[in-house]
Amino acid sequence: MNDRFHGRGPADEPKQNSASISTRKGPSPFLRLPGELRNEIYKLALHEDEGLYYVNTSLDKPILAMQKASSEAYNQLKFVNRQLHSETAGLELRVNKIKFVPEREGGTAADQFLHFARILNPDKANSLTNIVLRGCVGASHPFPKSLDVMESINEFCETDPACRVSYIVLPR
């Protein structure tokens, strides 16, 4: 007989209770990767070519989603565990274009953006890189209703010059 088959196999091992089988010692193999490599993986995982939509909620807890009618946050990695939360929370702001579109009751895209910027943690606000504000020709208010709104957007741009803000007006 071949020596490889002599000895004990998995079926011959003493039975362990299922609780001890599912426990692990130490971090997962992914979390043992160098931080720089994990950061690159996060950027690839959280980047959406078409960008993300700002979804206003009634709880002043904005959501960034792939579709403007979604109520599910795009970055699900931050819900896995505390470490992934600390490493990925807000990263979707840095690696994506964030789109604001007019809502029936929510005002113009500019109004929504300024609301978002006000309630956003200052550190996360500084990580914004690309904002797109959209209006529609023929809408009741394709542009902000007052000059104050544009001045506020200008102040944001002066405070965070690394962030590109575009205002696009499209046909209906």
Image (cartoon, helix red, strand yellow):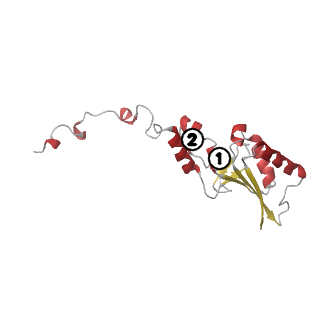
> Looking at the rendering, which quadrant does residue 109 occupy?
bottom right
Point 84% across, 58% down: residue? 143
Where does residue 98 sit, x and y in percent of width and height?
Answer: 69, 52
Is residue 41 shown above or below 134? above
Q: Residue under circle 1?
A: 94
Rendering quarter of residue 14:
top left
Three-letter amino acid code at the position of disc 2: Phe
SS at mark 1?
helix
Query: Foreground: 159 or 103?
Result: 159
- Look at the numbered disc 2 and give the secondary structure of its residue: helix
Graded by Cα atoms within 10 Å as few (under 14), some (14 to 19) or many (20 or more), the crowding at tag 2 reads few
Measured as percent of width and height from the top left, residue 4 is found at 17, 42
Q: Nearer the viewer, residue 86 or 164?
A: 164
Quadrant containing the N terminus is top left
The percent coordinates of residue 67 (x first, y second) are 65, 57
Is any atom of residue 11 visible in this view?
Answer: yes
Q: Few, some or many C-alpha atoms within 10 Å of disc 1 (few <14, some 14-19, many ≥20)?
A: some
Examine the rendering and report whether any part of residue 106 can be seen. no
In the image, farthest residue toward the bottom: 171
Q: Residue at x 36, y 35 (%)?
A: 21
Residue 101 placement, left or right of 145: left
Q: Which residue is mark 2?
A: 79
Instruction: Name the quadrant of the C terminus.
Output: bottom right
Quick one: label 1 or label 2, which is nearer the N terminus?
2
Circles 1, 2 touching at the beta carbon (< 8 Å): no
Q: Is residue 71 above or below residue 59?
A: below
Is 17 or 51 nearer to us in this picture? Answer: 51
* Residue 141: image tag: none
Q: Amino acid at mark 1?
A: Arg
